[in-house]
Amino acid sequence: MMTGAPDSFFGLGIAPGILDVLQRSKFTVPTPIQHKAIPIAIEGKDIIGIAQTGTGKTLAFGIPMIQRLAQRKGRGLVLVPTRELALQANEMLAKIAPAFNMKMAVVIGGESMGMQIQAFRSNPRIILATPGRLIDHLNQNTVRLQDVCVLVLDEADRMLDMGFAPQIERILRLIPKDRQTMLFSATIPAEIVKIASAYMRLPVRTEIAPSGTAAELVSQELFVVSKEQKGNLLGEMLRRHTGSVLMFVRTKRGAAKVARLLRNKGHGAAEIHADRSLAQRKEALSGFKSGRYRILVATDIAARGIDVTGIEVVINYDLPDDPENYVHRIGRTGRAGRAGIALSFATPDQGEDIRNIERIIRMSIPRSTNSDLAMVPAPSEPRPAPSWAGRRPRHHGGFRSFSPRRHRR
């Protein structure tokens, strides 16, 4: 595992023209994944890059892709799981590609097919797409992929989690075999190993942190709280932490409900989930970036689509359905060398969910007693029997509910 990086982009094999653009754009120090991946990718080798969200993967594949496209004919194709991630990758690459007269096209659901067809007619050198919308264009014969010479699968594990495996395999079969493939992922499940074996040529694996490792600069804290007390605990946490907050809930309905509750309490809050239109999601994200909204409430569809530096706190109002999503969620804070805070709310019957998360991140999440709230179900309700009841606490084991503090009269 690599922890260091050079103090500049010089010496990585990057062409002088791109170095000038990086300097003008104030990209001065490469992240570890950029330091390791760029020299390999510039040589044209296939690469599997394993690094957490928020570690600079877009430039890690973007710089080599643009440099190689400047040297040869052909096109670059970047596949990403979500609309937001496509837009943010486009925003990042737009700082470099135009300097080399490279047009780009973003192909995502929720936007006009007609406008995307117009973008294809302008002969873009780089296409950034979600798999589903790209398949729509392939079905209508509005795009062809026979000239793709550089392919990027970004957040590959997330694309597979979202059920895009059939679309990805169809796209891979339509692209020339004589291409460079770069695959980036936070984890390496068996499905990715299968894709690498079938569609990549002796890929070089470069790993910055062990698969599933949580962000090192993020301070984690777990609160065991009854469902009825979550709202009160949330209010206390928002008073205690005054910076920007990204909050995750499990369902679209839950996100809308929590966002409405926050607005009713006078907080600037927006929501982002699958039921929101693309325009609404763009407005919510831009408002969060600008500070118009202090709190952004999201479902896991946005866990890897929010590229915002400076998020102070991530709050897991609900634990994720998939324990690996915990890593992606808390990776939204503690970025660009800054410290971050991740607070998670669990109900007393979620002992197994916590153990599964701790197995993924290879550590125990500190349990908090730093609250005056009752961390157990209300006395009038029957106390549920936790799944871990009767077991001895282990490293990844059960946890205790917090008892209310008794105040002196």
Image (tube, rainbow, N blue to C red):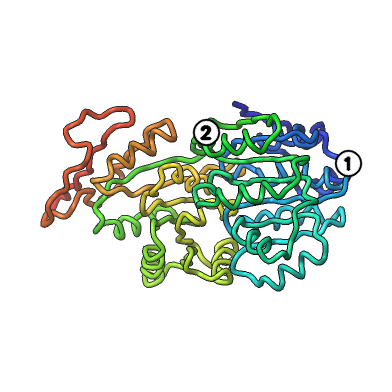
Q: Position of residue 349 (x, y in %)?
A: 24, 46
At horizontal 42% and vertical 30% (from top left) the residue drawn is 362
Amino acid at pointer 2: Ser
Work out whether residue 354 or residue 28 is closer to the camera in this orientation and state it: 354
Q: Tell me: 347 left or right of 85.
A: left
* Badge number at residue 89: none
Q: Position of residue 136 (x, y in %)?
A: 63, 63
Q: From the image, tell me which residue sits under label 2.
A: 211
At horizontal 59% and vertical 69% (from top left) the residue drawn is 110
> Which element carries disc 1, helix, strand or loop?
helix
Q: Tell me: 117 left or right of 50.
A: right
Q: From the image, tell me which residue sits under label 1.
A: 16
Figure check: 32 above or below 167: above
Figure check: 175 above or below 216: below
At horizontal 58% and vertical 71% (from top left) the residue drawn is 279
Figure check: 334 above or below 37: below
Work out whether residue 290 or residue 301 is closer to the camera in this orientation and state it: 301
Q: Position of residue 91 (x, y in %)?
A: 70, 57
Q: Position of residue 247 (x, y in %)?
A: 44, 56
Quadrant of the image for the N terminus? top right
- Mark 2 Cα shell of 10 Å, populated few (<14), some (14-19), many (≥20): some
Image quadrant in which you'd find residue 326: top left
Amino acid at pointer 1: Pro
